[in-house]
Amino acid sequence: MSVSGAIAPNIQLGAKIKVEKEKRKRLGITGTISAVWLALIGLSALLAPWLPIPSPKQAYIDLVQPDGNAPFSTSGHVLGLDGGGHDMLAQTIHGARVSLQIAFGAVMFGMVVGGFLGLSAGFFKGKVDRFISTLFDIFLAVPALILAMSLVAFLSGSSAQSGFLSIERIMMLALGIVATPPLGRIARASTLTWSEREFVMAARAQGAKNFKIMFIEILPNVLPAMMSIALLSVGVVVVAEGGLSLLGVGVNFTDKPSWGNMIALYAQTDLQLHPWLVFTPIIAVFLTVLSLNNLGDIIRARFDAKETTL
Amino acid sequence: MTDTMAASSEPLIALRDVTTYFKTPRGLVRAVDGVSFSLERGKTLGIVGESGCGKSVLSKSIMGLLPKRNVVRGGSIKFEGREVGQAGANELRELWGNQMAMVFQDPMTALNPVMRVGNQITESLIHNLDVSKDFAQETALQLLTSVGIPEPSRRLRQYPFELSGGMRQRVMIAIALACGPKLLFADEPTTALDVTVQAQILDLLDAQQAERFMAMILVTHDLGVVAGRADDIMVMYAGQAVEKAPTRTLFAQMRHPYTEALLKSIPKLDQASHTRLDAIGGRPPDLVHPPTGCRFAPRCPYAQDRCLQEAPPLVSHDTPGHEFACWYPVGTPEGAEALAKNQAAGIAATVSGGN
Amino acid sequence: MAGTGTAHLREPGETLLRVENLVVEFPVGRSGLKVNAVTNISLDVREGETLGLVGESGCGKSTTGKAIMQLPAPTSGKVLFGEHDLAALKGEELRVMRPRLQMIFQDPISSLNPRRKVEDIIAEGLNIWNIGTEAERDAKVNELMEAVGLDPELQRGKRPHQFSGGQCQRISIARAVATDPKLIICDEPVSALDVSVQAQILNLLEDMKARYGLTLIFIAHDLAVVKNVSDRVVVMYLGKMCEVGGPDDLYANPRHPYTAALLSAIPVADPSVKPSERMTLGGEIPSPVSPPSGCRFRTRCPRAQERCASEEPQMQQIAEDHFVACHFPLNPGETLTNSTEAFTA
Ligand SMILES: Nc1ncnc2c1ncn2[C@@H]1O[C@H](COP(=O)(O)OP(=O)(O)OP(=O)(O)O)[C@@H](O)[C@H]1O
Ligand SMILES: Nc1ncnc2c1ncn2[C@@H]1O[C@H](COP(=O)(O)OP(=O)(O)O)[C@@H](O)[C@H]1O
Ligand code: SF4
Ligand code: SF4
Ligand SMILES: [Mg+2]
Ligand SMILES: [Mg+2]
C-alpha cells in the first residue's frame, strides 16, 4: 500500500464514521424497541402496587405440583409460578422496582459525587487533583464486589440499631460509592481537556469566578461523556446487586424480591428442574442493560458538542 | 512563458466537466460543478479560491479519495490517457504513490501518529516498489536528506509528534515523493505554517518538482503563494472555475472581478499602515441553491441585470489560453461601464458587512 | 535579537500600558529544566495606538499576551496598566481590573463555548459585573452584534457551530468589547481565516477601534497584516525582542537581520518576483529550553560573528523611533543575502 493508500482509507473511514454518527443519532428500530422496553419496565416498576397482579408474597402453593413443577399454562399466571407458589410476573415487576431503584439511586449518587470531585480535580489541578485522584485510585484498587460487600456490611452494621437506613438505601449508597471513582475519572479527564479551551480563558478574562466557570462553562460540556458512562453503569449496578445477593449480602428474597436475589435463589434451587425461573429475571436484566447501552449511544451522538470546522 | 493550457503534447492529466455532488438531507451540495483543465509533466497548476469553494473536493475527486456513498460524480478524468473518473479507491490504489501523490494541509492528521517516521516511508516503498527492507531504509534516508531534514537518521526513528510543523510537512513531502510520482498534489501545504517555514517548504516543492520533472497542483487561498511558483492559475468560485490563465497573463490582464477582488483583499507591504482593505463583502453562496446566473453576482461590484439571469460561460476571448467567465470583465470598456454605473447608483463596490 | 533593554520605551506618563522586563518560564515536566518562553520583554502602548507583535510561531507572542492578561501571571516583570502593576495584584483586586483589558484568541472555534448561545456568550461580562438592567443588557447585545456585522434578530439564539470561522471571530470581538475595555489583546485573530475573510475582520477591528476608543495589541506572524493595522511594531524571536519601530521605517529599512529575513519570506502576489532570488531563512527556531547564548538569533543569522555568541545585544536607538537589538545591524537599504556564511560556534 502506498502512503496515499495508507492515508486514503483513513479519509474514507472518517467519512464513514460521520455517516455512522448521523445514523446513530436517529432512534431507529432498535432504539425504539429499547425505549419501549425501558418505558414498560420503568412504568410497571413505578406502578407495581397498583397493577392488577398478585402480591409477590402471595403463595399459590396448591397450584404447585408435587414435584415442584408450576407450568406456564397455570391459569391467571402468565409467567407461571416458582417453587414456593409465587407469581413470577409479580416477582419480576416488584423485582424491577427494587433493582432499578437501587441502580438509578446508586448511579445518581456516583454522578453527583464523582462529577463534583472529578470536576474539581480537573479544574484546580495540582494538589486538589493529586488528592482526589489518589482517593479514586485507592477505591479502584479494591475489587468492586469486595468493596461493595464490605461497604454494605459496614453500613448495615452501623445503621442496624437505629434502623435509619433501609437495606435498599444501604445498597444504593454502597454501590453508589463503588460507582463514584469511574464516573469521577471520566469527569476529571473530560474537565482537563475542556478547561484547556480558550473560552475558559476568555471567561476568566471577563472576570468570571471559578464556581461560574466550573458549572456554567465546563460542566455542560463534561456531562455528555458522563451520561453515557452513567447509563452503562446502571446496567452494571443491576448486575452487581444480583452478585451481592448471590453472596447473601443483598436484599433478602423473602422480604422483597429483586432481580438479583431472584437469580441468586433460583440458580441455587431450581436451575436443573425449572430453568425458566432463572431465565425470567436474567432476560429482564439482559434486555434492560442492552436497552440502556443502546439509548446511551444515541443520546451521546445527539448531545455531542457540534463544532464548526474551518 | 508559453501557453501551456493548449499545449500540443499529450497532457499527463486532463479533466473535462468534472462534477462532484454530495447528497445531503438539505439537498444536493454542488461542491465541484463542471471543472476542466489539463496539465503536462514539469508544469505547476495553482488552484486558488476562498474556503469552501471546492478546492479540496476537486483534489479528492481526482485522487479518488471520496466516499462512495452519497456522492454523485460526473465528467471525465484522464490520467495518461486512461479514464479514471469513475474509478474507486481500489482501482486507483495502484496509481497512488506510484503515479500521483498528495501532500495535505495538516501534516499531523495525515501522518500516522503511532508509527515511526522511517517506517511510514519504508512501508510505502516496500509495498509499491517491492524493494528489500535495506534498500527501502537507504532510500528513506536519502529522501529525508533531500527534503532538507537535518540529522535524518535520528529523525527516522522519531514519531510525528516529536517533529515541528515544518518538519512534519517535509516528512509528508518525502513520503509523497518516495515512489517517484508523476503528479504531486499539494492541498494548502503551507497554510498551517509560518511565513519563514512556508517559504522553505514552497522552495523545496519547487526544487523537487524541477528535479523529478513532476506535474504539480498547488492548492491555496493565497494568490501570493502561487504567483511566483505556478505556470498556470485556475481561480475557483463556488465549485466552478471562473478564470484560467498562464500566471503572468493572469496578473497582467486580470479579467474576472472575483480574481481582482481576491488580490485586492490581501494586505500589501507597500501600503501605508491603516489602509482600508478592499474586502469582498458577504460570503460564498449556498452550494445547495447556487444563484442562477453568475454565482458571484451577489458580491460582484460589476454585476448587472444580465448577470443575475444568465450564467457566463468560461471561454477564451482576446488572448488564447486565457479563459474567464464574466459578462463585464475587468479592464474592458464593458466592465468599466458596468462598474461606473453601479458606483453611480450608489452600490458600494465592496461591502464589508457580515460575512 | 536576543535583545534586552528598555531604550525603546517611552515616558511612563505617555502610555496606557507599560511592560517592563517580562519573563515567563514553564517547567518541563519534573526534569527541573524550564521553557524560556519569554525572556525580558519590554513594551509599551499609548492610548489609542495599535502595537503590532510579530514573530515565528513559538517565539512567545501568545505567552506575552497572556502574561499581560495575567492568565497566568508572569514569572517576573512589571505590567503597569494605568497606576496599577497588574503582576502584583492578587485575587479580587485583579478580578475587578479584568473587564478593562480583554483578549481575542486565534482559534475562533476553541474560544467559544459550543453549548452556549451567542447572546449569552456576548453578555457574559455584562452579567458577571451586573452592568445595567436586563433590558439594557439585551439592547447592548443587539448593538454589539450589529456593530460586528451580525444580525441580532436572526442570530442571537444560535450556537457557535452554526457560524463560520469569520463569524465566530466577530462574536469574539463583540464579547471582548462588551465591558468597554481600554485595551484589547488580539492574539492572531485572522491567522485561521482565509484572505477574503481576513480583510473583513481587519476592517472590522479598525472600525471597532474607532467606535469604542480602543487600544490594541495585535499579535500575528504575517508581517503584511501587522503593518496594515499597527502604529508601532515589535519583532520577537525566541522569547526576546529584535527590533521596535514605526511600521513605515521598520518595513522600509529593516535593521535587524531577522526582520529582513521575515520580510523577504512573505509571498508576493507578483509573478515577476522570483521567490528563488529572495533570501530565505534556513533551519528552524531553536528550542526555548536551551536557547543559544548571546544573541538568540545567531544560529540562523547570516551576519553572525563571534561577538554574537558571547555578548547579548542591547536595544539601541538607530533612527527616529526605530530601535534594534543587534551588534551588526543592517544599514538602511542594505539587503541580506544568502551567500553570507552562517557563523557556527
Ligand atoms: N462529504 C461532504 N458532504 C457534503 N458536503 C461536502 C462534503 N465535503 C465537502 N463538502 C462541501 O463542499 C464544498 C467545498 O469544500 P472543499 O473542502 O472542497 O473546500 P475548499 O475550497 O478546499 O476550502 P478550504 O480552503 O477551507 O480548504 C463546501 O461547501 C463543503 O461544505
Ligand atoms: N503552558 C505551557 N507550558 C509549557 N510551555 C509552554 C506553555 N505555553 C507556551 N509554551 C512554550 O512557550 C513558547 C512560546 O509559546 P507561545 O507564546 O505560544 O508562542 P507564539 O504565540 O509566539 O506562537 C513555546 O516554545 C511554547 O511551546
Ligand atoms: S460582472 Fe457579472 S458575470 Fe462578471 S463576475 Fe460580476 S456578476 Fe459575474
Ligand atoms: S548579527 Fe549578531 S547580534 Fe545581530 S542578529 Fe545576527 S547574531 Fe544577532
Ligand atoms: Mg480545503
Ligand atoms: Mg500563538
Image (cartoon, helix red, strand yellow):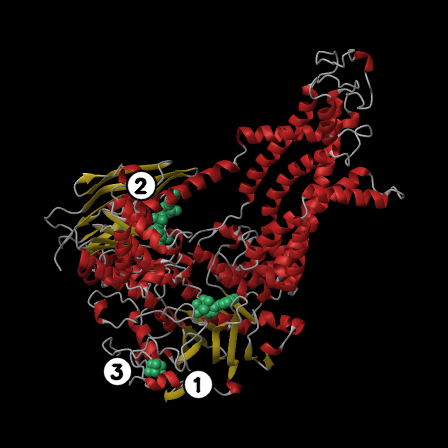
Q: Is mark 2 within 8 Å of ligand 1?
A: no
Q: In the displayed structure, does residue A17 sit left or right of residue B104? A: right
Residue beneath disc 2: B20
| Between C30 and C250, the one nearer to me in the picture | C30
Task: Report the amino acid beneath label 3.
Answer: Glu
Residue beneath disc 1: C8
| C-alpha separation, residue under disc 3 versus residue under disc 2 | 52 Å
Q: Quadrant of the C terminus of chain A?
A: bottom left
The secondary element bearing badge 1 is classed as loop
Residue beneath disc 3: C334
- Residue A246 horizontal/vertical position (percent): 73, 32
| Between C238 and B317, the one nearer to me in the picture | C238
The secondary element bearing badge 2 is classed as strand
| Between B315 and A306, the one nearer to me in the picture | A306
Badge 2 crowding class, 10 Å Cα cut-off, few under 14, some 14 to 19, many 20 or more, is many
Task: Report the amino acid beneath label 2.
Answer: Thr
Image: A17 above or below A68: below
Please give the chain letter of the residue carrying mark 1.
Answer: C
Which residue sits furthest right?
A161
Badge 1 crowding class, 10 Å Cα cut-off, few under 14, some 14 to 19, many 20 or more, is some
Q: Quadrant of the N terminus of chain A?
A: top left
Q: Is residue C102 visible?
A: yes
Instruction: Answer whether labels 1 and 3 touch (C-beta < 8 Å).
Output: no
- Residue C209 horizontal/vertical position (percent): 47, 70
- Labels 1 and 3 in the same subunit: yes
Q: Earlier in the sequence, mark 1 or mark 3?
A: 1
The secondary element bearing badge 3 is classed as loop
Please give the chain letter of the residue carrying mark 3.
Answer: C
Q: Quadrant of residue C192?
A: bottom left
Q: Quadrant of residue B106?
A: bottom left
- Residue B19 horizontal/vertical position (percent): 28, 41
